[in-house]
Image: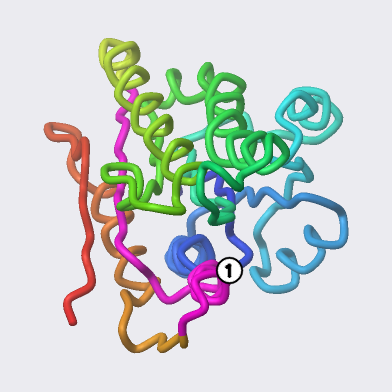
Amino acid sequence: MATHLITGAGSGIGAAVAGRLLARGDELYLFARNAGRAKELADRFPGAHTLVADLAVPDRLSWALDHQQLPERVDSLLHIAGVVDLGTVGELTTRTWNATLAANLVSPAELTRLFLPQLRVANGHVVFVNSGAGLNAHATWAAYAASKHGLKALADSLRAEEHANGVRVTSVYPGRTATPMQVKVHQQEGREYDAGQWIDPESVATTVLCALDLPRDAEINDLTVRPGR
């Protein structure tokens, strides 16, 4: 039985991944921003553990985790949580920039740092669920795309540093996926939302599990997923 730490398990891709891993009997530790959210996750995923740690405040992650029971073994750390706020460079405030970078880049870097010793011992796997915006930036996507371009750089550097330690690192770049985040994006764009146009979160979950389950003689570094419709 493998032990997985997952951010973003409350909805969308994260919930799909958590459900699949729990169904096959793996042990899960799910990050929640507060105690109320932790209870919701515990109710939704019976048997899973929760860790209260607010990704919006990366400077407090170490302190928060020091006060909780952590797993002794970590087979994978799955970075799936994310935030998005659209706006032109001329409109975006430092508040938006800082909030986006904190949740999408700095917190994944800090969580990776904190759990790297356990990952090394287990020859574990770090998976960054990035975005198509991590490869190409478009108008009004500057803050989000910058955070995701940074996440790619984080993953690439981590892979080069930890290969000799047996830690695998994978970046997954989904296109638009039918999640609550996509609903918000459509609202910001002033467009009608049709979930049927976009990737099912379960399909992205399948790609994540494919990377996790790959035999140790190989490693998926980068995996791009696009809508098939």
Q: Residue at x 78, y 58 (%)?
A: 38
Residue 70 lies left or right of residue 178; in this view the side is right
What residue did someone put label 1 on?
A: 11
Residue 47 lies left or right of residue 172; in this view the side is right
- Display colour scheme: rainbow
Give residue 204's quadrant in the image: bottom left
Q: Is residue 89 above or below residue 41?
A: above
Residue 203 appears in the picture as rendered: yes
Residue 96 lies left or right of residue 136; in this view the side is right
Q: What element does badge 1 sit on?
A: loop
Q: Where is residue 78 shown, x and y percent of the image?
A: 47, 44
Q: Is residue 145 above or below residue 114?
A: below
Residue 105 lies left or right of residue 49; in this view the side is left
State the residue in front, 113 or 76: 113
Q: Residue at x 18, y 41 (%)?
A: 215
Residue 3 appears in the picture as rendered: no
Q: Is residue 87 above or below residue 188?
A: above
Q: Quadrant of the C terminus?
A: bottom left
Give residue 197's quadrant in the image: bottom left
> Of all residues shown, which one is farthest toward the front?
90
Q: Where is residue 151 shown, x and y percent of the image?
A: 42, 33
State the residue in front, 98 or 202: 98
Q: Where is residue 80 shown, x and y percent of the image?
A: 49, 51
Q: Which residues are magenta?
A: 167-191
Is 173 in the magenta?
yes
Q: Mark 1: which amino acid?
A: Ser
Q: Is residue 174 above or below residue 220?
A: below
